[in-house]
Amino acid sequence: MQHDPIFTSWSPQAAALFNHQPIRLAHRLHKAAIFSTDGLADLISRYPREHYSLIHMGSQGEGKKFWREGDIGALGGHQVLEAIGRGRMWLNLRDVNVVDREFSRVLDETFAELRERLGGFTPLHRSAGILISSPSAQVYYHADLPGQHLWQLAGKKRVRIYPASAPFITSEQLEDISLHSVEVNMPYQAWYDEHAQVFDLEPGQMLSWPLNAPHRVENLNTLNVSMTVSFVTGEIRRQQMLHLANGILRHRFGFSGLGHATEGPSFWAKAMLQKTMRRTKWARQKKTQSRQINFRLDDRDLGAIVELKAA
C-alpha cells in the first residue's frame, strides 16, 4: 500500500461489497491541486475540443427530457466555471487520463490501490472524465455498460441507485444501449424511486455500484465537480460482446429468447457475429449520429447561451 492512501476509510466489509452493492467510501482526491479551481480552469482552457461535451438540460422535476449540446466558445477556464455555476448545464471532460499526464498518474495510483485492496482487481481498460455541473443540473435515469465509480470533488449531489434487474433494467435495454450507444432513453417511472438506494455525496466521498445498475443524479444547489471512472474487466467485456450480439440477432434477424451465457460454443459464435456485424453499414447506422452543436456560451453574459443556426 502506498504511504499516503487515496482511500481514507476502508471498512472490513468494503472489499466484499465493492462492485456488488452500492457502497460509499471516503477519499482524499478533493484536496489535490489538479482539482482546485485554478487547476480545473487551466485544464478547461487547454482541453481538446474533440474530448469534451457541453450539455444543456431541463430543470429538475421536469417530466420531459431536454438535452442539447453546445460549445464553450472563446471563454477561458475561469469564465467557463462561472458560466456553469450560473446556468443549467454540465461539462464533461472525457478521457482526461489520456489528455493530461497528471490525471493519468492519479488514475494509475487509484487502480493500484484498488488492486491491493480487492485482491488482484486488474481491469483490461479504464478511463476517467471530469464532470463540472451547474447547481440545478441533473443526469437522467440511465445505465452504463462498463463498471462505474463516481468521485465527488466539490459541491453536493444526490445519487439514486436502482436494482440491476427487471423491471428497472432488462436484457433488451442493455442490448439497445450496446447497439445504439444511447444510455439516457431508458423508460423511467416515478415509483422506481421507492426501490432506489439514495446517497448524498459530498467532497471527499466516492460511490461504487453494481454493474449495469440504473441511476440518476441531482445536484443539491451548488456547483459540482466529480470524477467519473469507467472500467472493463474480462467478464464485463464478454457481457458487452453478448449484449451487442443479442441486439443484432433481435433487431437484424428477428430472433427472440436469446441465451445469456458468456462462455461455451454459443457465446463464441455470438462473439464472432458481433465482431463481423459491427463493421457493417447496418450496424454503423444504428449508432447515434453526431450531436449537432446548438449553442455556445455567451461571453458577455456568463451563464447565458447564444443559439447557433443549424448547419
Image: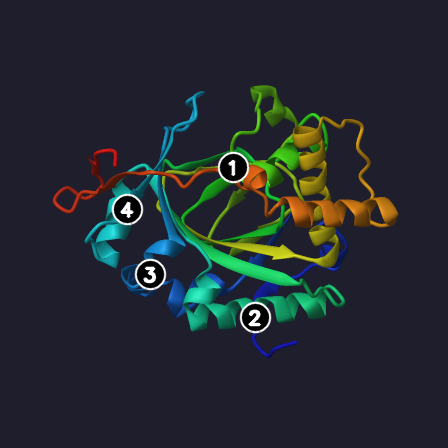
Rendered residue at 80%/39% (across/down): 260
Query: From the viewer's perspective, is residue 120 above or below residue 269?
Result: below
Question: Of label 2 and label 3, which has the lower sequence position?
Answer: 3
Q: Are marks 4 and 3 in contact (CB under 8 Å)?
A: no
The residue under label 4 is 71
Q: Is residue 181 visible?
A: yes
Disc number lying in front (1 or 4): 1
Residue 47, numbered circle? 3
N-terminal of the pair, mark 2 or mark 4, is: 4
Q: Secondary structure at mark 1?
A: helix
Q: Please name the residue that numbered disc 2 is placed on.
A: 108
Tell me which amino acid carries mark 2: Asp
Number of numbered labels in the structure image: 4
Element assignment for label 2: helix
* In front: label 2 or label 4: 4
Q: Which residue is mark 1?
A: 285
For label 1, the crowd category at 10 Å Cα-Cα, with few meaning under 14, some 14 to 19 and many 20 or more, is few
- Residue 13's spot in the image, x, y percent? 75, 55
Q: Are marks 2 and 1 in contact (CB under 8 Å)?
A: no
Q: How many neighbours does mark 2 have within 10 angstroms: few (below 14), some (14-19), or many (20 or more)?
A: some
Disc 4 is placed on an element classified as: strand
Q: CA distance from mark 2 to mark 1?
A: 36 Å
Q: Name the image quarter holding residue 3.
A: bottom right
Q: Nearer the viewer, mark 2 or mark 1?
A: 1
* Image location (x, y in percent) of residue 54: 34, 45
Alpha-carbon neighbours of circle 3 within 10 Å: few (<14), some, or many (≥20)?
some
